[in-house]
Image (cartoon, rainbow, N blue to C red):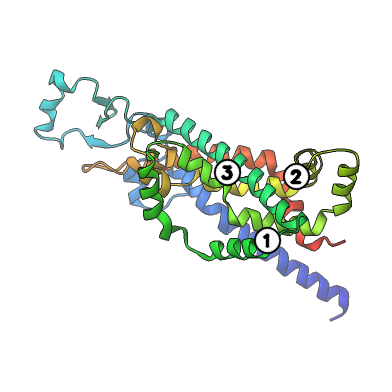
């Protein structure tokens, strides 16, 4: 086999593997979208690659509560519906009675809460982490190596070991039912600091900083006006990772947030499983599908920078 034939075979194998991995990655997403259009009975019946006819019904379940009790199986429960005390707590959708507490399940409020938390934590995280990485890369001061070693050490610690202490600290300063513990700690992102420092080491020329100082620019002006534009590929890459991580964050908001009007979208979607009579899997899949929309929009907006950001390690002066 000559060189050209061998190269063609290798390319074909690579293309086949690429197609395989793309299919493996996309099939679960496709099945999730399909299940968002099917009923719980259809989902429990087995796998299907064809969409169902219950998308509107699942949407109605999602924006009310999503936990249903099938008519004819409720027994004495039917009598509760006529009790004025329970007015506005039940709604009929098709052949189901849905229970929901007015004001406690607000899908759009949860959507907005998640958006505020994700955007705030992402913006704070990439800016202050970049500022920290800039100081570690540019300035020479005592304790710099220790700080860098400490950041690497923090990265090796599992986040779960700090949950109890973090909750106790937030409780002591009365911030347990607030968005502040979900956004401000993003400033101390060890992984982002590591990524940004390595990126600066490969693309940032210290002569630019000296030139800015000669022209009379202050240190913060140099960072904001000169350094940040150079770091745009890395900033965009970390913004995508930070936004996705914050948007999908479930454990921390679940631990800290108690008020119904402050709960984020992942918590509200999880509440769809909370009924003792019935779990509406179609509504759950619909909630997951809705939660993907901001991630897709954000990724499409920032994706033009992601390739250059991820391949920064191959660029050397």
Q: Disc 3 or 1, which lies upstream in sequence?
A: 1
Label 2 and label 3: CA atoms lie apart by 16 Å
- Residue 283 visible in the snapshot: no
Residue that badge 3 annotates: 243
Residue that badge 2 annotates: 232
Q: Position of residue 279 (x, y in %)?
A: 29, 43
Q: Which residue is drawn at 47% across and 38% down?
A: 180
Label 3 and label 1: CA atoms lie apart by 29 Å
Q: Where is residue 186 in the image (x, y as percent from the top left)?
A: 55, 46
Q: 14 above or below 162?
A: below
Q: Residue at x 46, y 36 (%)?
A: 179
Q: Residues within 10 Å of mark 3 (few under 14, many from 20)?
A: many
Horizontal arrangement in the rendering, residue 284 relative to residue 67 (left or right): right
Q: Disc 2 or 3, which lies upstream in sequence?
A: 2
Circles 2, 3 touching at the beta carbon (< 8 Å): no
Where disc 1 sits, the SS reads helix
Label 2 and label 1: CA atoms lie apart by 25 Å
Q: Where is residue 86 in the image (x, y as percent from the top left)?
A: 17, 23
Image quarter of the C terminus? bottom right
Q: Residues within 10 Å of mark 1 (few under 14, many from 20)?
A: some
Circles 3, 1 touching at the beta carbon (< 8 Å): no
Image quarter of the N terminus? bottom right
Q: 185 above or below 152?
A: above
Residue that badge 1 annotates: 144
Foreground of the two, 32 or 173: 173
Q: Residues within 10 Å of mark 2 (few under 14, many from 20)?
A: some
Which of the 4 quarters of the picture holds residue 21? bottom right
């Amino acid at each position: 086999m000559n060189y050209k034939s061998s190269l063609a075979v290798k390319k074909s194998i690579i293309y086949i593997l690429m197609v395989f991995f793309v299919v493996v990655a996309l099939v679960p997403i496709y099945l999730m979208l399909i299940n968002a259009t099917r009923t719980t009975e259809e989902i429990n019946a087995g796998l299907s690659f064809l969409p169902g006819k219950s998308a509107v019904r699942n949407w109605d379940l999602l924006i009310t509560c999503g936990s249903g009790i099938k008519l004819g199986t409720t027994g004495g429960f039917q009598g509760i519906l006529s009790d004025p005390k329970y007015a506005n707590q039940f709604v009929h959708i098709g052949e189901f009675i849905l229970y929901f507490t007015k004001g406690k399940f607000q899908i759009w409020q949860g959507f907005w809460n998640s958006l505020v938390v994700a955007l705030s934590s992402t913006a704070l995280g990439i800016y202050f982490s970049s500022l920290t990485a800039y100081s570690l890369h540019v300035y020479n001061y005592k304790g710099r190596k220790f700080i860098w070693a400490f950041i690497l050490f923090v990265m090796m610690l599992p986040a779960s070991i700090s949950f109890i202490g973090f909750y106790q600290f937030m409780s002591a300063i009365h911030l347990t039912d607030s968005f502040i513990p979900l956004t401000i700690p993003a400033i101390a992102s060890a992984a982002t600091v590591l990524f940004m420092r390595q990126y600066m080491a490969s693309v940032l020329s210290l002569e630019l900083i000296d030139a800015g100082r000669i022209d009379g620019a202050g240190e913060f002006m140099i960072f904001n006006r000169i350094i940040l534009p150079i770091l745009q590929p890395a900033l965009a890459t970390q913004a995508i990772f930070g936004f996705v991580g914050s948007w999908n964050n479930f454990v921390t908001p679940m631990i800290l947030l108690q008020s119904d009007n402050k709960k984020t979208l992942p918590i509200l979607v999880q509440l769809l499983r909370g009924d003792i009579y019935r779990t509406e899997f179609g509504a759950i899949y619909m909630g997951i599908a809705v939660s993907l929309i901001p991630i897709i929009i954000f990724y499409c907006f920032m994706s033009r920078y992601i390739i250059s950001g991820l391949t920064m390690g191959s660029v050397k002066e």
